[in-house]
């Protein structure tokens, strides 16, 4: 290539570089603010060479102040001033640094192309605006030329060509001469007057003739148009023949109109009749709508009063056949014949169902009290607090909460049962309505009614529990209505004791021996509890006769040793592979056979 360029006259200035492998040994470190670091070189064949060239030729520090600019060997500012060496400085303001037309940002020129396109559009708008201004100036030049030509025409005219006064004087003289000739000759004057009179008569007759012809032509046109319109109406296939009733009704409405029915007033009268008919139709539609609403309201009343009989029928007019069919069935079923049967069922079944409901509520409350007696028996087996001078036990009492809803519900049931066998039909019907209201309220899906139903039927909500701490002589030491006001340890002890007693009852009945099903499994047991509480809880479960299976972190092992009979260590690696290592237990010493270093590590972790 060098030989070809050397032997060829190019006619232009050419600078070219060899693009081989860059000489990395010449590379020197660049600063953190170097202009080279502001550029990203796209991967390609010449990426390494281009990166090396940039490091060699454009390693300029990007500075924000003149002080930094002066202290740097090679630097460049945001305003475009470049320092090539200690002596050579350059700033080219022939183009603005911020003009994006002179540089490309990124790996393609799409944004620059968009900039040129926007600039081209602005230039096109400017050209269009200037073209309009040029056209406007051209029109002004044409108007000036036309006006100049008209002015030249006026300059070329002679005064005699536009002077009208002599002509007017001549005409006035001739008219005066004619008038003097007529006034001097009586016969001529009379003939002139007769001529003027006949001219007036002729003009009036001609005017009347023209008006008559116009009226005649207008009448002929109206006759032709009316005939064509009549023939068109007679031949219209969509024309419907009226019934005698319709003809009679239309005749009555046309007669009532103030205008006489003529051809010229037919459209006006017809419009008035149509307006009246539309008004009547609108009123009838309103009446139909009111009737439909009234019918739907009756359907809604029926569905609200007898929802079981209404079933899945809705209250729209489309369900009218179903409602009418039910009406026919009610009328043909002979309901009065079943009235006696209704009262018998009201007496027997309602009494039985209400008595069963009342019995259920009483039995459920009694069962709760009996179960609490068994729980208290279990609590009496294990001391709740124990010291050198005193031993106390936990006793749980159940008492009624005296809820207003529950009290009113029981009163309604009692009142309904107290008059179940009355023979008074009116009182029985009133009792039936009261029972129906009660049943509807119990069956309602309204959130408020559902809350009420759960309150009156869930006997567990009718009682409240109070924990009493008593000593061996039965003297009350402490009352626990909740965990409020107690320390964290007291709340944990209370919850653990109640839990163990409940499990003792559920798993072992009311016997004082070992539970029939003794194992209790606790996962992540005592993870956040201290050693004192861990020992207390395990002691409670052990005293109740449970066999504990505990999965616990290593820190609790030392505390659990006296309460267990064996142990194994479980390890999981990579969340997929698990292994189990059995650990022997020393029953005499009540501790695991662990190496001393493992026991020390467990003690350190527990502390």
Image (cartoon, rainbow, N blue to C red):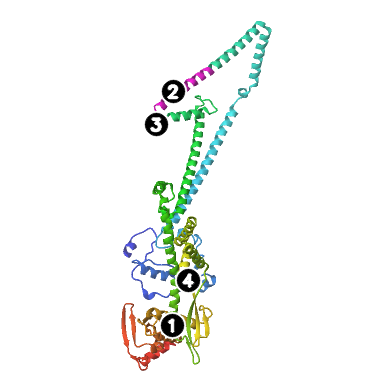
| Spatial separation of the CA atoms under disc 4 and disc 2 | 95 Å
- Residue 129 in sight from this viewpoint: yes
The image position of residue 359, as x and y in percent, is 44, 69
Point out the residue furthest to the bottom here.
588
Relative to 64, is 541 above or below? below
Q: Main secondary structure of the magenta part?
A: helix
| Residue bounds of the magenta highlight | 211-238
In this rendering, the label closer to the viewer, 4 or 3: 4
Residue at 66% across / 12% down in the picture?
179
Q: Earlier along the polypeptide chain: callout 4 or callout 3?
A: 3
The image position of residue 455, as x and y in percent, is 48, 67
| Spatial separation of the CA atoms under disc 2 and disc 1 | 116 Å
Task: State the residue in front, 138 or 148.
Answer: 138
| Spatial separation of the CA atoms under disc 1 and disc 3 | 99 Å
Q: Earlier along the polypeptide chain: callout 4 or callout 2?
A: 2
Report the residue marked by disc 3: 238
Task: State the residue in front, 384 or 485.
Answer: 384
Report if residue 435 lies within the magenta region.
Answer: no
Dot 4: element: helix
Relative to 596, is 483 above or below? above
Dot 3: element: loop
Q: Earlier along the polypeptide chain: callout 3 or callout 2?
A: 2
Q: Earlier along the polypeptide chain: callout 2 or callout 1?
A: 2
Dot 1: element: helix
| Spatial separation of the CA atoms under disc 3 and disc 2 | 19 Å
Report the residue marked by disc 4: 461
Q: Residues within 10 Å of mark 2 (few under 14, many from 20)?
A: few
Q: Residues within 10 Å of mark 4 (few under 14, many from 20)?
A: some
Report the residue marked by disc 2: 227
Rendering quarter of residue 205? top right
């Amino acid at each position: 290539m060098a030989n070809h360029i050397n032997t060829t006259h190019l006619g232009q200035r050419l600078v070219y570089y060899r693009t081989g492998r860059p000489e990395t040994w010449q590379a020197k470190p660049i600063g953190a603010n170097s202009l080279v670091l502001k550029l990203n070189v796209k991967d390609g064949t010449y990426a390494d060479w281009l990166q090396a060239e940039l490091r060699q030729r454009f390693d300029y520090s990007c500075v924000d102040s003149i002080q930094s600019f002066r202290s740097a060997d090679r630097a460049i500012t945001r305003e475009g001033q470049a320092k090539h060496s200690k002596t050579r400085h350059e700033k080219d303001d022939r183009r603005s640094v911020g003009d994006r037309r002179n540089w490309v940002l990124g790996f393609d020129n799409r944004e620059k192309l968009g900039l040129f396109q926007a600039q081209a559009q602005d230039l096109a708008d400017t050209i269009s605006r200037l073209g309009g201004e040029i056209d406007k100036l051209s029109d002004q030049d044409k108007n000036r030329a036309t006006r100049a030509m008209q002015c030249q025409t006026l300059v070329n005219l002679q005064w005699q060509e536009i002077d009208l006064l002599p002509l007017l004087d001549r005409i006035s003289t001739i008219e005066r001469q004619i008038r003097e000739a007529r006034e001097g000759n009586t016969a001529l004057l009379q003939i002139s007057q007769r001529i003027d009179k006949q001219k007036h008569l002729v003009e009036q007759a001609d005017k009347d003739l023209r008006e008559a012809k116009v009226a005649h032509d207008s009448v002929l046109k109206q006759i032709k148009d009316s005939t064509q319109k009549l023939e068109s109406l007679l031949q219209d296939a969509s024309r419907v023949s009226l019934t005698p009733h319709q003809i009679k009704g239309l005749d009555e409405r046309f007669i009532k109109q103030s205008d006489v029915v003529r051809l010229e007033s037919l459209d006006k009268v017809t419009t008035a009749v149509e307006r009246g008919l539309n008004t009547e139709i609108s009123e009838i539609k309103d009446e139909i709508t009111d009737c439909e609403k009234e019918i739907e309201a009756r359907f809604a009343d029926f569905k609200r009063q007898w929802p079981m009989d209404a079933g899945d029928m809705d209250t729209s007019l489309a369900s009218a056949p179903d409602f009418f069919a039910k009406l026919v069935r009610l009328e043909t079923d002979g309901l009065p014949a079943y009235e006696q049967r209704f009262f018998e069922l009201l007496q027997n079944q309602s009494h039985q169902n209400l008595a069963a409901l009342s019995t259920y509520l009483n039995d459920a409350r009694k069962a709760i009290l009996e179960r609490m007696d068994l729980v208290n028996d279990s609590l009496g087996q294990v001391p709740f607090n124990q010291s050198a001078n005193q031993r106390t036990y936990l006793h749980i009492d159940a008492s009624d909460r005296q809820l207003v809803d529950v009290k009113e519900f029981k009163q309604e049931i009692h009142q309904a049962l107290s008059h179940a066998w009355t023979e008074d039909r009116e009182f029985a019907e009133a009792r039936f309505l009261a029972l129906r209201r009660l049943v509807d309220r119990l069956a309602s899906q309204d959130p408020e009614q559902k809350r009420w139903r759960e309150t009156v039927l869930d006997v567990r909500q009718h009682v409240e529990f109070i924990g009493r701490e008593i000593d061996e002589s039965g003297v009350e030491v402490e009352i626990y209505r909740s965990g409020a006001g107690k320390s964290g340890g007291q709340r944990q002890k209370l919850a653990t004791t109640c839990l163990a007693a409940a499990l003792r009852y559920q798993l072992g009945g009311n016997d004082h021996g070992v539970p029939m099903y003794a194992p209790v499994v606790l996962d992540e047991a005592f993870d956040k509890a201290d050693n004192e509480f861990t020992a207390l809880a395990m002691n409670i479960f052990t005293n109740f006769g449970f066999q504990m299976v505990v999965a616990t972190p290593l820190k609790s092992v030392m505390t659990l040793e006296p309460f267990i009979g064996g142990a194994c260590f479980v390890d999981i690696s990579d969340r997929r592979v698990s292994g189990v290592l059995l650990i022997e237990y020393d029953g005499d010493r009540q501790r695991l056979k662990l190496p001393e270093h493992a026991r020390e590590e467990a003690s350190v972790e527990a502390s």
